[in-house]
Amino acid sequence: MADGKSHPNTDYNLADPAEFMHNMTRVMEQAAAMARLYAERKEPAELDSTVRPTLERMAKTFAEISRTYADHPDKLLQAQYELWQGHARIWQNAWRRFLGEPVEPVIEPTRSDRRFKDPDWEKNQIFDFLKQSYLLTARWAHDVVCEAEGVDEHTRQKARFYVEQIANALSPTNFALTNPEVLRLTLASNGANLAEGLENLLKDLKAGGGMLRISQTDLSAFAVGENLALSPGKVVFRNDLFELIQYAPSTPRVFERPLLIVPPWINKFYILDLNPAKSFIAWAVAQGLTVFVISWVNPDEHLAMKTFGDYMREGVLEALGAVEAATGQASVNAIGYCIGGTLLTATLGYMAAKKDERIASATLFAAQVDFEKAGDLLVFVDEEQVSGIERQMAGKGFLEGKRMADSFNLLRSNDLIWSYVVSNYLKGKDPVPFDLLYWNSDSTRMPAAVHSFYLRECYLNNHLSQGRMILDGVRIDLARVKIPVYNLAAREDHIAPLASSFRIGRFLGGETRLVVAGSGHIAGVINPPDAAKYQYWTNDKGGDTLEPWLAGASEHPGSWWPDWGDWIAARSGKKVKARTPGNGKLKALEDAPGTYVKVR
């Protein structure tokens, strides 16, 4: 509750007017340099091919929402009246507060909204007024699109997403004069923060060839194989699509059954081996598992026609043969992460049809097989947008990794876009070194054929869950997959939403153990026990739908890794002498992490 005092702040004073004018001259010089860079950018067509269609889709979507309210003018009047009422209450409270009365805020940020943490958003009456006016209008706009009648759900979802992005962009936290922390810093530093921020902005524009590539971390602070992806091992197999890494044992004896990890090809495998303290791979090796990981190639135009079936046949299935050659074991346990989990599950359906029993159990990390509830990524998937992506890929033979990265960043734009705009460009700070964000920036390209298949078969048509996907002439029926499955879903996942990952068990024919991890798509998975962070939930009684399952679930503090460790140990056979990479039929080609992972 506000205490009724206006709290004049003495921090909003200009320290040195002459120095301020000098820094404003620097700002103008940087702005002129950016204008020249924009005019000389090498690929203006790329900007036109992405921004213009997006703006046209937004306009079309909002036109659909407007049409529904034109057909129901009473609803529009009611919505406008509620907005006016809300703003009137904010004005009344501001006046009462000015007179010294204690008042309750009309609206407050959610607990997860970190934009308004500066004390002056509450203590300073002007900034408090700005904050509440913004939050009220943003919520009103959200409600207007969500309550529109007579529109299909995809249009409603797109409109809600677009409104959210516009609202996030227009937040008062994103502007120097309406952000108390930035304003204080600007006055105290005589505008040096803005001059340095414009320098940072110019660097990012140059790095993007005239298109903005926001720096989230200090890229010079990391190098794969030097301070990332350090677990010792050898590349023991290589083809056009992947390198297979076998990791060196850290125990004298290991379980008989090896472990094969199928990571996503949208990003690189070393999210599972960031550093020794965060490495799932190192932890799994320490539990006595012989770990193999697929390191996908970063494809170029030469692999444009590689299909989803090729990634199954030349990827997962060839990797199984290589693991057997390296260890002498035909039966393995397998892990699939994100889209790697989707590929692994489809491969299991193919193997079931072929009566191929080389995979004894499967673990899925934040994966999906049913895409009906795939969340906000569905905003980017309809016939018009998929056809547009296909036309773009037809020229180069692949989709640039930054396109996928941009889409993922938009799903959490306040955290992954606007927080860096404020920090880098308004506060003038240099990005700090952060290994996870370096990995996030190390995106990979998508071969045209495989990406088109994935978008159409999974997101657009949802054929995998419906038993209508065809791989190498085989219809994939997931009900024929009878092996045990450990399904790890993340509670706050914005890429593979919990509501989607939860459904995996209903399509498979065997026993599925569902475990729900705290946090999101990355932090929920990469959560080593020593960190003592987050929690996970289990429910031995299960549940047909998500809400009853969560209501009856038991919460456990810390990492889910030991729970999985017990589960996988029971399915890994007896202990045998530890295997040294390169001592089997497959000889070592080079040290881990290999060559493919280093291609940017």
Image (spheres, helix red, strand yellow):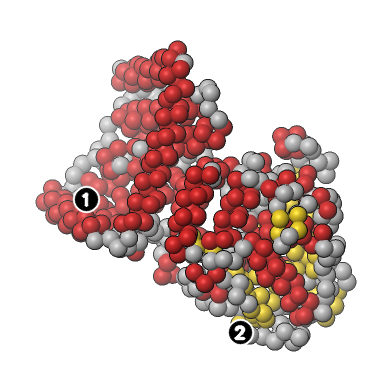
Kind of residue at badge 1: Gly
Q: Nearer the viewer, residue 386 or 187?
A: 386
- Real-space Cα distance between discs 1 and 2? 52 Å
For label 1, the crowd category at 10 Å Cα-Cα, with few meaning under 14, some 14 to 19 and many 20 or more, is many
Q: Earlier in the sequence, mark 1 or mark 2?
A: 1
Question: Measuring 50% from the left and 73% from the top, which residue is drawn there?
Answer: 599
**Would residue 482 be found to the left or right of residue 493 on screen?**
right
Q: Which residue is mark 1?
A: 191
Considering only vertical position in the picture, is 138 above or below 522? above
Looking at the image, is mark 1 or mark 2 nearer the viewer?
2
Q: Residue furthest top?
A: 74
Residue 163 visible in the shown view:
no
In the image, residue 404 sits, relative to residue 87, either above or below, namely below
Q: Residue furthest right?
A: 574
Q: Is residue 93 above or below residue 56?
A: above
How many callouts does the rendering have?
2
Q: Residue at x 47, y 60 (%)?
A: 394
Nearest the camera: 477 or 564?
Answer: 477
- x, y percentage for residue 452? 56, 55
User: Residue 359 at what x, y percent from top left?
Assistant: 80, 65
Mark 2 lies on residue: 590
Q: Secondary structure at mark 1?
A: loop
Relative image position of residue 524 (x, y in whole percent): 63, 52
Q: Is residue 316 left or right of residue 270?
A: right
Q: What amino acid does circle 2 point to?
A: Glu
The residue drawn where x is 17% and y is 53% is 28
Q: Label 2, secondary structure: give it.
A: strand
Q: Which mark is residue 25?
A: none
What crowding class fits label 2: few (fewer than 14 Cα within 10 Å), some (14-19), or many (20 or more)?
A: some
Classify residue 177 by image quadrant.
Answer: top left
> Residue 458: x and y, percent?
64, 50
